[in-house]
Amino acid sequence: MPGNGKGSDHASSNGNSNGSGNGKGNSNGSGNGTGTGTGTGTGTGTGKSDGNAAYGSKPFKRSKSHFADRVTADGRDGWPVEAGRYRLVVSRACPWASRAVVSRRLLGLEDALSLAIADPIQDDRSWRFTLDPDGRDPVLGIRYLSEAYDAREKDYPGGVSVPAVVDIPSGRLVTNDFQQITLDFATEWTALHRPGAPDLYPEPLREEIDVVMAGVYRDVNNGVYRAGFATGQSEYESAFHDLFRRLDLLSERLSDRRYLVGDTITEADIRLFTTLVRFDAVYHGHFKCNGFKLAEDPVLWAYAKDLFQTPGFGDTVDFHHIKQHYYRVHTGINPAGLVPVGPDLSGWLTPHHREELGGRPFGDGTPPGPVPPAEEVPPTGRPEPLH
């Protein structure tokens, strides 16, 4: 999402940011740790205060990765997997950060990797911890995520993005490589997975998963931003057509299979879900992605509802945070900052009938347990239960 002064989270650079983006994925963003990738980081990046108002007035471009260290089992980048050592900083508004929240929950990493949730509303220093007592993260002791960036690289000029993994003892940012973080959760953090954790990146299917994720990243995950922050009609229409062409292909693919690759949930499903769950609430109107609503495509709507109702997906989604962030922070495309009342969220809890296609959500594993009480989404962010 777009930036403010120093820049923020995961969306685009407005042309003058070094960015803080993802990076180590392959060139189309699906990455498995090789290649260059293109990143998340965003914002105006020079400390100027034009920030959010710049979105929609400057060319959209994702920045390349800046902090792409990896937390691995062998610690080859100097950051070994270790329970309790790191803190995952996210915004529930951010689709890229939400991937990490879903993955962490499905794999049962809650006790090994603590979670910090930033306020969806940013000021000119970007992501802040104003949801916490005294406006300070209780574990890292900082008011702004940018402080962890500065601890890693003093006077870092680029965007401040989530998700971010921070080393608790030193207070330094380790990585904000959103493409690689979740793949490493699945493949490098295995010693800390819960019993019954699913294999979200199964080795026999990785090539197919990467191909599917590449198209999803280019045309859907990134495509909604290309449309929403377009500065010219042709630029917007190109992104629009790419997006809905890809959604049509995905709908066709999912018409006779429950999940994108294989018969279980994989990383590919996580990456598509975090965009689909925001589609009607923000992308359809706010980003002018109005070819159709998600709820108007029977296949994609049923697929998204199936995942939403699967433990580990919908129980991480906060629609209140999502709407507050997009509509109030993106002042370049929503100057008045008005937040829509709709859409009706009750449909997310209606029957989807996708189980008729077979499939085993967790493979040979089991669903995750209850959400830790401190991480429960407040009622204001959830659909009301059906009676």
Image (cartoon, rainbow, N blue to C red):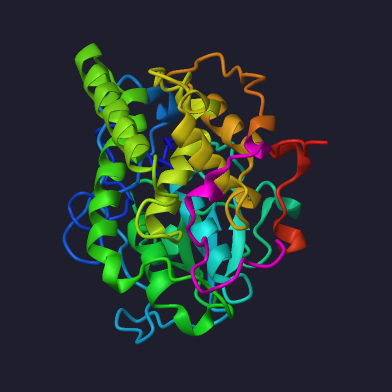
126 or 12, nearer to the observer: 12
Does the stretch in magenta take in 72?
no
Q: Residue 7's image quarter?
A: top left
**Percent x, y of residue 277:** 52, 38
Q: Which residue lies furthest to the right in this view?
A: 387
The C terminus is located in which quarter?
top right
Q: Does any portion of residue 92 appear in the rendered image?
A: no
Q: Residue 344's image quarter?
A: top right
Whether residue 269 sits left or right of residue 102 in the image: it is left
Which residue corresponds to the image point at 48% horizontal and 49% vertical from the top-left? 357
**Percent x, y of residue 103:** 50, 62
Q: Does any portion of residue 261 appear in the rendered image?
A: yes
- Magenta stretch: dominant secondary structure: loop
Which residue corresponds to the image point at 45% horizontal and 53% vertical from the top-left? 270
Which residue corresponds to the image point at 25% horizontal and 22% vertical from the top-left? 241
320 or 171, nearer to the observer: 320
Which residue corresponds to the image point at 23% horizontal and 49% vertical from the top-left? 38
221 or 23, nearer to the observer: 221
Q: In this view, does 364 lie above or below 284?
A: below
Does the stretch in magenta take in 350?
yes
**Percent x, y of residue 261:** 34, 56
351 or 279, nearer to the observer: 351
The N terminus is located in which quarter?
top left
**Percent x, y of residue 305:** 57, 41
Q: Give the range drawn in magenta.
A: 348-371
Q: Is residue 290 above or below residue 16?
A: above
Whether residue 360 sits left or right of residue 272 in the image: it is right
